[in-house]
Amino acid sequence: MSNDNDKIFARLWKLWAMICKMIMDGKRDPRFVATILQRIVDGIPDTFTHIWKTIKIGNGPLTGVGLLSRLVRGGCSLEEDVGLVLGSPNFVVSSVAQTIDLVRVSVEQLGFAKRTTYAAICKRALEFGLELCPSDVGLQLLLQYETQPINDYFFVASKMITCADGHSRIFGLNREKDGRQVLLTFRNHPHWHEGLDPNQELVFMLPKQGSDG
């Protein structure tokens, strides 16, 4: 048993030395490392494994137009740019029926204290073992998240969908003060190079149990 403990402590010291070196080399944000360590000390449940919502995909219309029709019939409102996304050949509707688990985290929880690019946010989330959502999750959430609170607002992290105007977009959801649910888009515009605020929340997908990812 003592030999096993010695190995564990040796591994801990090695990892700590590696972390310190990465901080000194500028490869890790010290505030991010401090946040993670504090989370361990406080015993806070891991944000990145807590299931926020479970939804079904691939069990409805198999085209963007079909999903759009269901949203409109259900009384949902659509931002103007939504049509550009749904009309893009890069927008794919899941064809296999399955259940997926989603987590919801803020940019700050991912370790960023200031506005951060979408690419950097996704890279950090993947380092935590999260996955990008299929491109139709935003629409499915709008259909399946009827209890969304007033003024609740978030983006769905997926691969950026390139549209006919040359810009790339992802979906977002908002519940307006009048109770309407609105499907939004976030455009990866050059003027928005500063990215998303630390308090902005995004939804990612948890890997399937038993997967290697």
Image: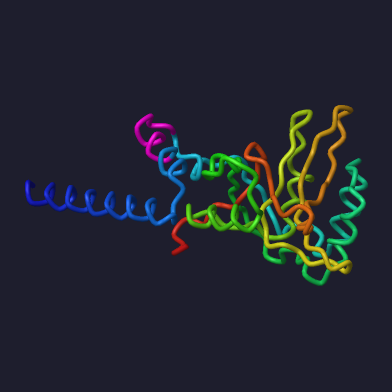
Please report the residue visible at 79 percent of the width from the left and 38 percent of the height from the top.
174
State the image coordinates of residue 21 (x, y, percent, origin top left).
Answer: 33, 55
Q: Quadrant of residue 161?
A: bottom right
Tell me residue 47's x, y (percent): 50, 40
Q: Nearer the viewer, residue 200 or 95?
A: 200
Q: Is residue 179 left or right of residue 104?
A: right
Q: Main secondary structure of the magenta part?
A: helix
Q: In percent of the image, x 71 and y 63: which residue is there? A: 94
Q: Is residue 42 magenta?
A: yes
The residue stretch that appears in magenta: 36-44
Residue at 79% across, 54% down: 191
In the image, is residue 3 above or below residue 211?
Answer: above
Residue 31 visible to the viewer? yes
- Work out whether 54 lies above or below 18: above
Q: In the drawing, does residue 74 fall left or right of residue 110? A: right
Q: How is the image coloured?
A: rainbow
- Report if residue 38 lies within the magenta region: yes
